[in-house]
């Protein structure tokens, strides 16, 4: 056992004394030491139930012959962090989570791990850590919350953000907003649509790192506790068979996840996280590679915000495995990839049928013949940009309009709510990227304001920041190179014509090359608007050209 490094031999007598201080018995020190990485806290709704999940995992581990030991991982609620300086800290926590979990797991020589995440950054962060540590590991998330119900219709957090815009437009009263406020998020769990957290939890299943139902069983269902117990048992079986994350998270498994991503219509943030996870196993790819997969993968689901269905509906329809079974009929998946069950993908999904063709469209009736995400390139995004194609209105798939330029999110929101943005405009929000922000804030507030003002099918939004999975409409994010490094988005001027062509994967600024060259020559770098503490030091490192910082490596 790996843990023998801290438990066995005369040299480890001091170590054993510390285990005795923890209350360990001699019998326990003869068993595998299983770390339970708990993201439980009392500030993130998706994590407030994780103490119960962790307890269930511990029972499963102990029943199968291991010794469960809990240690924590941090987590940020993007909804609460949205729209203020806190959002500058959200994305960077992914790497802090990966680093700190790697430190804990290797410092204490755990034999196996069970990861218990739920929300946006700690699912990918813990997947990255799993690949680095490479001991038998199973994931079990806290699960999605149930959809809210307002005036007889299902709703979710994205509707709440849009309600604020509707109030500003005068189409919703304060009483209406209060009703949404009290009912949009009715239970614990990750927010109920196909936002980033649920996207990543579903893709954990597709990767083979979570058991069936990991992404879709609602947080408040007792099935979730049974799943957690089975996760604890499964990790012990993996330990006995020495099945490790890098045996599971192969290049082929990443391709499976990208394919399922396109079928489900996942968050644009998956184009940040899947490449980072792939990097940990030595598989580096340009995000434009996703278009090759999208071109042959039908979009089968329109979960909120793209459509009227929610995670609970996907769960009842058969879940991720039912979607994968549909894709298998087109030979789009590698069926031989091993998973945490000890079985292959093909063995896992056999017999998992689509129980509701209104939630999971059959292959002969997809929402579109191509996948839910698209990577656009052009002179405005030479290195790429990402749009959730499945959430774009048909009339906005091709759009041309004048640029309305803002150097931060707050100025854009003020203009939108002030009625200064009109149909046909292309809102450009820049200096919100990894370096320019710094921290690459999420732009859910501006997109929700546009939708709430009734402009969702007539106004586009482009940013070097990123978009929440809750964003809909012609919202194009992750524009690279970002403004802070002199990308073309920094050179856009008020009134310039921007051309968007999603079917042709193009994003162009309609300005002569000579004019762009002149603007580039006159452009001067800006100092990022830093915030307190660690992020301020990070921004200083970036602007001074320092090397070696983990966040600089991952986000620059």
Image (spheres, rainbow, N blue to C red):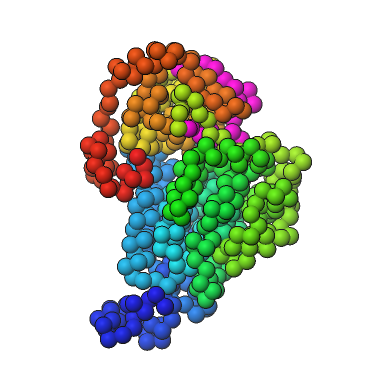
Instruction: Name the residue located 41 percent from the left edge and 59 percent from the top edge.
Output: 132
Instruction: Name the one closer to the observer, 420 or 115.
Output: 115
Note whether residue 119 is visible. no
Q: Magenta region: which residues? A: 384-403
Q: Position of residue 502 (x, y in %)?
A: 58, 27
Instruction: Name the residue located 38 percent from the left edge and 55 percent from the top edge.
Output: 98
Tally of marks: 0
Q: Position of residue 7 (x, y in %)?
A: 34, 81
> Quadrant of the rendered structure where residue 515 is?
top left
Q: Position of residue 226 (x, y in %)?
A: 58, 67
Confirm whether the magenta stretch covers residue 547: no
Instruction: Name the residue located 22 percent from the left edge and 37 percent from the top edge.
Output: 544
> Quadrant of the rendered structure where residue 347 is?
bottom right
> Quadrant of the rendered structure where residue 219 is?
bottom right
Note whether residue 512 is visible. yes
User: Compared with residue 116, is residue 95 higher up or lower down, i.e. above or below?
Assistant: above
Confirm whether the magenta stretch covers residue 389: yes
Instruction: Name the residue located 34 percent from the left edge and 14 percent from the top edge.
Output: 518
Q: Position of residue 386 (x, y in %)?
A: 51, 34
Instruction: Name the one closer to the observer, 297 or 196.
Output: 297
């Amino acid at each position: 056992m790996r843990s023998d490094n801290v438990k066995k031999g005369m040299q480890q007598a001091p170590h054993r004394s510390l285990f005795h201080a923890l209350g360990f018995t001699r019998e326990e020190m003869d068993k595998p030491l299983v770390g339970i990485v708990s993201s439980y806290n009392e500030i993130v709704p998706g994590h407030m139930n994780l103490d119960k999940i962790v307890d269930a995992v511990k029972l499963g581990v102990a029943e199968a012959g291991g010794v469960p030991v809990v240690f924590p991982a941090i987590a940020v609620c993007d909804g609460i962090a949205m729209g203020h300086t806190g959002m500058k800290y959200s994305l960077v926590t992914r790497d802090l989570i990966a680093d700190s979990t790697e430190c804990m797991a290797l410092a204490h020589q755990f034999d196996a791990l069970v990861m218990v995440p739920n929300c946006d950054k700690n699912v990918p962060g813990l997947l990255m850590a799993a690949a680095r540590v490479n001991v038998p590991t199973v994931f079990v998330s806290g699960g999605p919350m149930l959809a809210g119900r307002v005036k007889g219709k299902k709703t979710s957090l994205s509707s709440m953000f849009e309600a604020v815009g509707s109030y500003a437009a005068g189409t919703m009263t304060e009483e209406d907003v209060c009703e949404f406020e009290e009912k949009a998020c009715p239970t614990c769990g990750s927010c109920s649509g196909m936002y980033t957290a649920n996207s990543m939890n579903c893709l954990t299943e597709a990767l083979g790192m979570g058991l069936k139902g990991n992404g879709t069983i609602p947080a408040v269902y007792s099935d979730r506790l049974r799943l957690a117990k089975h996760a604890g048992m499964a990790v012990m079986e993996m330990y006995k068979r020495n099945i490790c994350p890098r045996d599971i998270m192969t290049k082929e498994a990443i391709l499976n996840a990208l394919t399922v991503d396109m079928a489900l219509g996942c968050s644009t943030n998956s184009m940040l996280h899947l490449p980072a996870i792939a990097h940990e196993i030595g598989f580096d790819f340009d995000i434009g590679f996703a278009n090759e997969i999208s071109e042959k993968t039908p979009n089968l689901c329109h979960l909120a915000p793209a459509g009227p269905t929610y995670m609970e509906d996907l769960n009842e329809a058969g879940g991720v495995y039912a979607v994968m079974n549909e894709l298998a009929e087109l030979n789009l998946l590698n069926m031989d990839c091993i998973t945490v069950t000890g079985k292959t993908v093909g063995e896992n999904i056999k017999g998992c049928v689509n129980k509701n063709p209104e939630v999971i469209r059959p292959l002969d009736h997809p929402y579109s013949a191509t996948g839910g995400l698209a990577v656009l390139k052009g002179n405005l995004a030479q290195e790429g940009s990402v749009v959730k194609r499945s959430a774009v209105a048909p009339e906005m798939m091709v759009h041309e309009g004048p640029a309305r330029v803002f150097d931060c999110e707050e100025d854009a929101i003020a203009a939108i709510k002030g009625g200064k943005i009109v149909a046909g405009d292309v809102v450009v929000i820049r200096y919100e990227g990894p370096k320019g922000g710094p921290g690459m804030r999420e732009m859910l507030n501006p997109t929700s304001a546009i939708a709430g003002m009734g402009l969702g099918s007539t106004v586009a939004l482009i940013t070097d920041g990123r978009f929440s999975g809750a964003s809909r409409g012609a919202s194009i994010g992750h524009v690279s190179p970002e403004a802070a490094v002199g990308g073309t988005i920094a050179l856009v001027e008020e009134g310039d014509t921007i051309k968007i062509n999603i079917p042709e994967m193009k994003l162009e600024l309609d300005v002569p090359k000579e004019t762009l060259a002149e603007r580039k020559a006159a452009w001067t770098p800006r100092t990022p608007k830093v915030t307190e503490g660690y992020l301020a030091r990070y921004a200083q490192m970036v602007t001074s050209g320092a090397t070696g910082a983990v966040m600089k490596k991952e986000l620059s």
